[in-house]
Amino acid sequence: MKLLLALAGLFALGAANQPISTSKVVCYYDSKSYVREGQARMLPMDLDPALSFCTHLVYGYAGVQPDTYKMVPLNENLDVDRTHANYRAITNFKTKYPGLKVLLSVGGDADIEDPQKYNLLLESPQARTAFVNSGVLLADQHGFDGIDLAWQFAKFKPKKIRSTWGSIWHGIKKTFGTTLVDEKETEHREGFTALVREMKQALSVKPNMQLAITVLPNVNASIYYDVPAIINLVDIVNIGAYDYYTPERNPKEADYTSPIYTPQNRNPLLNADAAVSYWTQHGTPTSKIVLGLATFARTWKLDGDSEISGVPPIHTDGPGEAGPYTKVEGLLSYPEVCAKLINPNHQKGMRPHLRKVTDPSKRFGTYAFRLPENDEGGIWVSYEDPDTAGQKASFVKSKNLGGISIVDLSLDDFRGLCTGDKYPILRAAKYRL
Ligand SMILES: *[C@@H]1O[C@H](CO)[C@@H](O)[C@H](O)[C@H]1NC(C)=O
């Protein structure tokens, strides 16, 4: 009897010691997907199968009104009007998923009108007050649990890996259309710190409102984020560790877009591990750090000068063709990539499928390509798949970080077209956390 009791006690202890995952799974929903066509069109109800995996749902994106500096819906029609009222549709998911936190994100590189306003706002205490007050009101009125500042800071200049291609970089002027040169970095860093403080203060008047910040790709965190000054004020730091290379910024050279560690002979700052280190080295509790992974692929055209091995960095000729559903040059959703990877039974007249190259070291990511052939164009694709998403989740776990974020749900395979499973990237990451 005693032995039995002792054993029962041991079992009970064992069960209690089972680690219950407290990892965050922060799911971004980009409302742009509402107006895509065909298979890519995503409605709020399509989110449902994802939400049992998500701890946070982040609605992207609100914007800044240029003259008043108020935080406003970027698409009023869709976000708040009676007919669609997506803000409400999204926050209403909390009835079905009571643990879910729903945040409203502002910026996110989605607010393209007059990008300078993000800097000007930081320079003016009055503008910050207008932004904070309108933002808290907007979030509170629509049932959000907080705000995510995905601030649109100036991005650093694209960096070449091999300088010999410098002379043929004719795309560079166009690229800089959206890349601001910031002559007041210090002022903007201080302004952002003030904004975080003011936003936190305004949010804390309401019960249980969270404050998250998102570091957008190619924003230099060491310039703009004064970690010791802001870290106690924010609940989540979401690091956008993808798009280190993009066809828009780097039209003539393709590379792994979101490596975990530094590939050989590359800039040691442009990877997830380095991005995380900046925050931890400046005293961020690891539990607040969330690693952002992209569900979309970046694509480049290959031409006659591209190395036939396909190994990156590889010479390219600008962004790849737009996908059939997402219709954006240089970008494919995961299901669009997946469709290209399927061997079309060697049927005559079918475009050849892409050759997938995985990384046995699990450090840099997967790519796929097809060399140009006769009149068929070549393409090079860097993308996240369920395997690499799982590798990122394992990295997060090994570093004891707070969790992962999925940017965004609409470009994961939300219909289950690849294998029948809906949201395969989200699932794979969640299972490895
Ligand atoms: C970010 O800024 C720091 C200086 O504050 C600089 O040393 C570093 O190279 C920059 N990182 C990138 C990726 O440009």
Image (cartoon, rainbow, N blue to C red):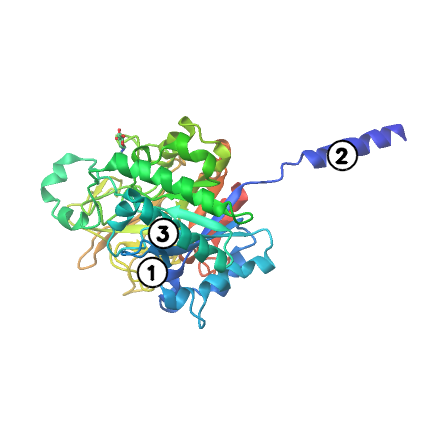
Q: Is residue 178 left or right of residue 205?
A: left
Q: Looking at the image, which residue is at 54% across and 41% down?
A: 23
How dense is the environment of label 3, judged by Cα within 10 Å: few (below 14), some, or many (20 and up)?
Answer: some
How dense is the environment of label 2, judged by Cα within 10 Å: few (below 14), some, or many (20 and up)?
Answer: few
Query: Residue 218 versus residue 329: which sits nearer the camera?
Result: 218
Which residue in the rendered view is the most extreme toward the front? 126
Does mark 1's beta carbon lie closer than 8 Å to ligand 1?
no
Which residue in the rendered view is the most extreme toward the left? 167
Local SS, label 3: helix
Image quadrant in which the N terminus is located: top right
Residue 237 seen in this snapshot: yes
Residue topped by disc 3: 130
Q: CA distance from mark 1 to mark 3?
A: 60 Å
Q: Amino acid under label 1?
A: His
Q: Position of residue 304 (x, y in %)?
A: 15, 49
Q: Amino acid under label 3?
A: Ala
Image height of 413 relative to 274, above or below: below
Local SS, label 1: loop
